[in-house]
Image (cartoon, helix red, strand yellow):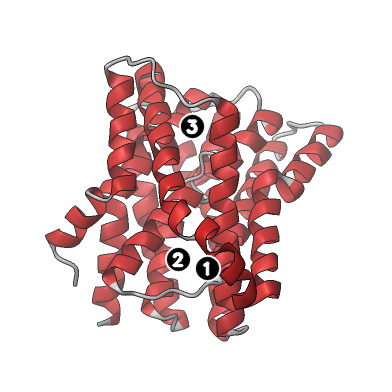
Amino acid sequence: MPDISTSLALLTSPAILFFFVGALAAFVRSDLTIPEPVAKALSLYLMFCIGFKGGVEARAAGLSGDFLLAGAIGIALSALMPLVAFIILKRFSKLDRPTLCALAATYGSVSVVTFAAGQQHLAALGLPSGGYMAAVLALMETPAILTALVLLNGAGRGEPGRRRTILREVFVGAAMIMLLGSFLVGLVSGSAGMAKLELFVGPLFQGALCFFLLDIGLIAARRLMEGGRKLTPVVVGFAVGFPLLSAAIALGLARLAGLEVGNAALLTILAGSASYIAVPAAMRLAAPQADAGVYVTASLAITFPFNLTVGIVLYTAAATWLWA
């Protein structure tokens, strides 16, 4: 089971340290900023690298039962956990329905950057994971959004034209196309393709991740300063407790399914993450009246830092202990 040194190794990695540099810059009100086009380009680049490398590794491993099991578990979690979140929040919070649905979708979907940090941590520990987990990541982004739309429109909200626009954005949005498209390219080109792009998707990935996390640190800290008063104790508790619940359920299902420890750990990390890219983009169309100061701030300023500092190590340790 990993000791404190594994936590320190993750927290002192360059990418995580740059996250804290960005947060510090925001807290001292520095004028440091990353232009929006650059930030979007970095997001697409990270998704390209994750998807392509996953496709190459999936081709090397072949279509396996683990892939099908992990994909089925991931889709089920993404579709059903928003229902659990909705019930909890409706019972204990005073949020309006649009904000409640947006928050439920946020914690049913997943974070690409948390996935990337989890991969790096597992690699440092020598725990291999299947390349197909990049495809599982892509599969877990969408069902939560669809569930939230059902919950939102179940109360008579939403127009047919708007719903069609949202569904189009979900299925052909930049994140989905880049992740699945690059995965398929890697799957088709295999090791020959990797030989041509090794520098682009290998060493350069680390620098891009550092730059991206610097920007995320800036955004998270500024969101916290701007919207901190909207985060009630119930929302804060939910932002920490619900990822732990999701991760525990995912870990139990992975153990029952007999997944390998590295894949189980990565699936658990995904289940414990929260979306701050795909869901806000969809909810901007689906529920413009939802308070982004609640659901974006909760995921970006509370859950994301929690996972970087505690969650990834905790989920990995739980997996290695359970599989020992």
Task: Count residues near mark 3 (Cα–Cα under 10 Å), then give few for <14, some for 14-19, many for 20+.
Answer: many
Q: Is 164 displayed left or right of 289 in the figure?
A: right
On residue 291, which mark appears?
none
Contact flag, marks 2 and 1 (Cβ < 8 Å): yes
Residue 171 position in % (x across, y down): 74, 50
Task: Give the percent coordinates (x, y) of residue 2.
Answer: 19, 68
Marker disc for residue 133: 1
Q: Quadrant of the C terminus?
A: bottom left
Q: Quadrant of residue 181?
A: bottom right
- As helix, strand or loop, the secondary structure at mark 2 comes to helix
Q: Residue at x 33, y 49 (%)?
A: 307
Question: Residue flagged by tag 2: what amino acid is it?
Answer: Leu
- Decide which of 253, 210 is in the foreground and name it: 210
Q: Amino acid at mark 1?
A: Met
User: Which of the two labelled residues, at mark 2 and mark 1, occupies the earlier sequence position?
Assistant: 1
- Residue position marked by numbered label 3 in the rendering: 296
Q: At x 77% / y 44%, what residue is drawn?
A: 167
- Numbered circle sitting on residue 267: 2
Q: Position of residue 143 (x, y in %)?
A: 64, 54
User: CA separation, marks 2 and 1?
Assistant: 8 Å
On the question of residue 109 being in view, the answer is no
The mark lying in front, picked from 1 and 3, is: 1
Coordinates of residue 247 in the picture (x, y in percent): 39, 60
Residue 154, located in which quarter of the rendered image? top right
Front position in the image: 164 or 7: 7
Dot 3 lies on which element? helix
Residue type beneath disc 3: Val
In this rendering, would 309 be left or right of 227? left
Q: Residues within 10 Å of mark 2 (few under 14, many from 20)?
A: many
Closer to viewer: mark 2 or mark 1: 1
Q: Quadrant of the N terminus?
A: bottom left
